[in-house]
Amino acid sequence: MMKLGAFLPAPGHHVAAWRHPHARPDGGLDFDYYRSLVRTAERGRFDMVFLSDGAGVRTTYRDAEELSRQGRMVHFEPLTLLSALAVHTTHIGLTATASTTYNEPFNIARKFASLDFLSSGRSGWNVVTSVTDAEAQNFNLDRQPDHATRYDRAREFMDVVTGLWDSWEDDAFEYDKESGRFFDPDKLHILHHQGKHFSVRGPLNVARPPQGYPVIVQAGSSPDGQDFAARWAEVVFTAQQTLDQARTFYRGIKKQAAEHGRNPDDVKVLPGTFIVVGRTRAEAEDKYAALQDLVDPVVGLGLLTGQLGDVDISGHPLDGPLPDLPPTEGSTSKQQLIYEQARREGLTIRQLYLSVAGGRGHRFLLGTPESIADELEEWFVGEGADGFNIMPDYLPDGLDAIVDLLVPELQRRGLFRTEYEGRTLRDNLGLPRPAFGAARHPAERRA
Amino acid sequence: MMKLGAFLPAPGHHVAAWRHPHARPDGGLDFDYYRSLVRTAERGRFDMVFLSDGAGVRTTYRDAEELSRQGRMVHFEPLTLLSALAVHTTHIGLTATASTTYNEPFNIARKFASLDFLSSGRSGWNVVTSVTDAEAQNFNLDRQPDHATRYDRAREFMDVVTGLWDSWEDDAFEYDKESGRFFDPDKLHILHHQGKHFSVRGPLNVARPPQGYPVIVQAGSSPDGQDFAARWAEVVFTAQQTLDQARTFYRGIKKQAAEHGRNPDDVKVLPGTFIVVGRTRAEAEDKYAALQDLVDPVVGLGLLTGQLGDVDISGHPLDGPLPDLPPTEGSTSKQQLIYEQARREGLTIRQLYLSVAGGRGHRFLLGTPESIADELEEWFVGEGADGFNIMPDYLPDGLDAIVDLLVPELQRRGLFRTEYEGRTLRDNLGLPRPAFGAARHPAERRA
Ligand SMILES: Cc1cc2nc3c(=O)[nH]c(=O)nc-3n(C[C@H](O)[C@H](O)[C@H](O)COP(=O)(O)O)c2cc1C
Ligand SMILES: Cc1cc2nc3c(=O)[nH]c(=O)nc-3n(C[C@H](O)[C@H](O)[C@H](O)COP(=O)(O)O)c2cc1C
């Protein structure tokens, strides 16, 4: 079975989504709006809702006037939003992005453990190392730490967080009112972590989460990112544009996971997929054209700049080619992907920003339920993907169309569930519940 | 009108609460349990539910065996829990404790702004600087920063957080689909804070909260703590045992607030009050005796040690007097309060731990609805308090008794509301909504 994430930034993925007549530009701070979206996704039997995040507003625009034309800008912090959604849903997984660069592991371990209890085992954590200097500047730095340092910290961060989740064995708490013993002292494990980036004593003041550990999702596809994913991720969110690329990436992750002593089936690869679906191809094309017409050049260029890792291309003519780019300390894999696309398809800067206006470098599918199901099936069967992180164009219509038109077609083909397999995110993703201490010794798990 | 907080640690305040036959020792990680408690408090028209917090488990016990007899230990992280409760309640305020010592201001500003949107203006932040080395050891330190340094950081933390809440004017967002302008660039204010502890650029990626700023609650009563409260707090949670003490504290806070250019009415002083109420005094005494009988000496001594700021008194006989104490870097006001009580009442160590087993140094009221209402009224009318942070003995029974017996008596006397005045926590507390930029120039507010 395919695994499907519903990646739901208000008011949709297309950069001009907020200008659509049906869109709710203020949806990012409206709980009822989100509740209704996530219930639609749950009706569509999605494995999880996925929320990206950044700890800041990108402000590398020429001036406030330019910035004021960008959409989104303000929205709920994902962990607080998902905590509220947890108690208004019953089956769908809840995955929030949080950065290892701008948080402390004790706080993150606590919050995700808490969300896992609130949701009775439906939490996921998308582990990122962040990408912009704008974020660094909100945390006492001028520039972000370099790429290698960020991943170095991220690796140690995971040791600490999983160690904290293993503070208490699953059955540590006895609550024996008679004897007065609250827990079994042999089942408390104090971490005493002393490392390069962190020293954290423990124990965590939350019990072991219902899922053992919340599901570890990861987004970041550079060599460092892939190595990190192979060691830690149970779901890998990635941007891939061709089946060949996707296959290479998929095989690489699975192989590296095996080298880390893991079962390759325990890492699900979910390429992001921007979808515009209509009852007919013409209907889909019309929908897309309407959105593309709404793209303000200032916004298109701003988006492209961000995708390229905040590289300044404003001096170059819009109708000329993309120049060669300096290396970025941001997402190297993202920059590479978009650069290659421009060269492969021979796009001008304007054509390039229009091409990323929807999917932001992710695969773009437009058509009927049948044609899109064909394309998803091809990647799924062809070992390019275990499923997809679905990116609707604008909300709520885009998600409604996916749930009402595309999902039934996938179900008809037996590619997607008609009922949830279980009550936890792990149950539905087909991931094992990690035994106590599982993260500590990956080599031992092989034995 | 009195203001009432419902201070609700599962499974209640009494140190032996979890051993009571009706208590739910696992309630700290059960959402349905908390939802039911908070709905009871809302039925009782409480201003707010109040959750204390610490970023760690105190592990200064002799060994794990001793630790295993302490209750509580694991519980929800307050911000995630209150986010979930926000969407299952309609009027009650939601106040979470978070430390300025172990968080970054950008993250705190975001999360509380997000909670304020989730709850449509019912969030409060209890600002603390933390008290134990056990917490420090979860954040890369051996010992906590000293008392003065913690408060110094806290003051700058507030400048940053309120500055971030003022990133966007209240009406900054235009969402003009036609022109493509998302916000008015003149209404964006980038903080550019550069200080001793923090450099934070801004803007916040959340709009200005519904309440302008979430309500600022503060707990910490040392001279530094009082100065901080007078400058920043809108609700002061404090431990006071006699009306004389309470009056001195109350007058001091109001006077200092005025010196900071604030209206003294905009600072509400709420002493913590541990309550055991019965239909008759005998019933209340029986309830209390039943709990006191369940206090394990190891637990009583552990609690007392914590209240004294982790000062080791284990070498002294339980039936002898409290020795002189070394200064603590923890809560100096708490240590002082309990030390004075021991001397004033001539208590042995055992008597002292039994006396703090319920209220942990807070005022203790036991009796009938009428007698307790008399005692609350005396402090309220006598300018010792603007209201109380109510601490039930064990849950849910203790809260039920307060809502069903004591609250109606207060209402009958016209001391407490029968209906909520408004929909935001500020409305109900009678606090003004701060205008844009209000926190920046306290001296100007006087003008
Ligand atoms: C598909 C994808 C999605 C990402 N989503 C986020 C995100 O939501 N927030 C964020 O800070 N970084 C995000 N990143 C970047 C990660 O932070 C990543 O850890 C870091 O920038 C390095 O990326 P790289 O390994 O691809 O170079 C994403 C990256 C990819 C490839
Ligand atoms: C009534 C009261 C309640 C408090 N609650 C908490 C709390 O929940 N979490 C915490 O870390 N500190 C708490 N503190 C202590 C504060 O962190 C305080 O900022 C710091 O320890 C210094 O306190 P002091 O000013 O009383 O010395 C509390 C203090 C008082 C007096």
Image (spheres, coloured by chain):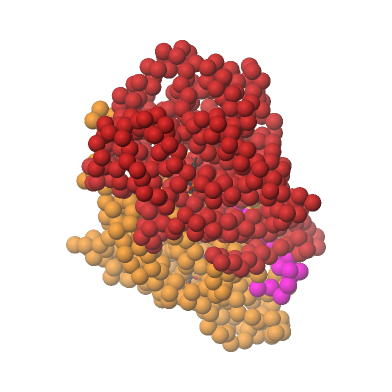
Chain colours: A orange, B red
Residue shown at 69%/41% (left/top)? B264
In the image, is B255 to the left or to the right of A171?
right
What x and y, as percent, mark residue A301? 68, 74
Q: Residue A335 in the image: x percent, y percent? A: 54, 77
Main secondary structure along the magenta-highlighted residues: loop
| Residue found at x 69% / y 85% | A316
The quadrant in which the N terminus of chain A is found is bottom left
Residue at position x 46%, y 12% from top?
Answer: B280
Residue B109 belongs to the span the image colors magenta: no
Residue A68 drawn in magenta: yes
The location of residue A412, given as percent across then percent down, is 48, 50
Q: Is residue A49 above or below residue B277?
A: below
- Most extreme residue toward the bottom is A324
Q: Report the front residue among B174 and A335.
A: B174
Q: Which residues are magenta?
A: A60-78
Residue plotted at (39% across, 19% down): B287
Q: How many numbered marks, from 0 up?
A: 0
Q: State which quadrant residue B183 falls in.
A: bottom right
Residue A38 in sight: no
Residue A413 drawn above or below residue B29:
below
Q: Return the x and y of residue B223 as percentages of the image width and height.
A: 54, 48
Asked if residue A445 shows in the view, the reply is yes
| Quadrant assignment, res B243 | top right
Q: Depth check: give the residue in front, B323 or A22.
A: B323
Toward the left, the furthest residue is A447
Front residue (pair B379, B178)? B379
Q: Quadrant of the C terminus of chain A?
A: bottom left
